[in-house]
Amino acid sequence: MDYIVAPSILSADFTRLGEQIREVAAAGARYIHIDVMDGTFVPNISFGMPVIQSIRHCTGAVFDVHMMVQEPGRHIEAMKKAGADVLTVHVEACTHLDRVVNQIKEAGLKAGVALNPATPIQALDCILDQLDMVLIMTVNPGFGGQKFIPYTLDKVRALRSVMESRGIQADIQVDGGVSGANVPALMDAGANIFVGGSSIYGHEPAARVKEFIQIFEEYRK
Ligand code: DX5
Ligand code: ZN
């Protein structure tokens, strides 16, 4: 299993965004998690294509764009142009999820689908074999710095087990309240991509990224 830490720039210092992205990438982060919020699907508004386009030149890391946006299918081409590599949409925000997933893949991007904490994993039964990644939200989306919701761990475990029984090898990403303290339990449950916002950008981001990578290495032993 490929274990990846994905720092979320939502918690970065926006006055030094480029620098803060280079810092985590140099420390070994292969993904940069980019939270796009529209003020409708979630209460908060963050940033969009112009910001993504301007940070694209900072790093060759994978741009993992988490669309907390109502009907995100409208923005696939623009997100691709801005520099997205992985585009994750919420099942709760798509009237025609199958169409949106296909459009993401036709655009040449990797397709992820996110589930809010209260959305059961069965919502993905019909589409699971088409996905590159499932994002299990471990907080209610909209804000950084929230507390991990414990029951979401069971969702990760159940999803990995369904995937294994169906021979599906997609990534499982977890996002919200993730830190060194709960990564081992999340790895045990079957998650392999770990988003860290406040736990990474809160204090010495490069050191925090290295800690995540250290946990992955310890786990493999
Ligand atoms: C929350 C976002 C997260 C956020 C995580 O809606 O999707 O990516 O940045 O922040 P932390 O790790 O602080 O919970
Ligand atoms: Zn996110």
Image (cartoon, rainbow, N blue to C red):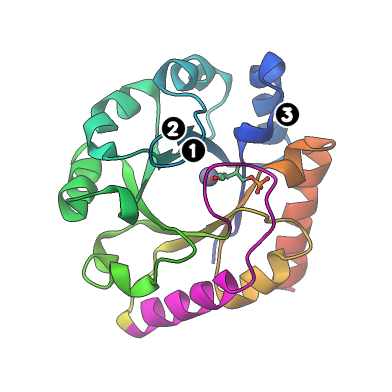
Position of the N terminus by quadrant: bottom right
Give the CA separation, mark 1 to mark 3: 30 Å
Q: Quadrant of residue 6?
A: top right
In the rendered view, tell whether residue 5 sits above or below residue 52. below
Q: Classify mark 2 as within 8 Å of ligand 1 or not, answering yes or no.
A: no
- Residue type at the position of mark 2: Gly
Circle 2 residue: 39
Write down the residue under mark 1: 43
Q: Nearer the viewer, residue 133 or 15?
A: 15
Distance (Cα) linking label 2 and label 3: 29 Å
Above or below, comparing residue 190 to residue 56 in the picture: below
| Above-or-below relation of 112 to 78 | below
Would you name the residue on which mark 3 appears?
A: 23
> Label 1's element?
loop
Q: Earlier in the sequence, mark 1 or mark 3?
A: 3
Please count the marks in the image. Answer: 3
What is the secondary structure assignment of the residue under circle 2?
A: loop
User: Mark 3, residues whose alpha carbon is within 10 Å: few (<14), some, or many (≥20)?
Assistant: some
Magenta residues, start to end: 139-165
Q: Quadrant of the C terminus?
A: bottom right
Please state which of the two labelled residues, at mark 2 or mark 3, is closer to the viewer. 2
Expressed as whole percent of the image width and height from the top left, the position of residue 116 reads 45, 58
Amino acid type, label 3: Glu
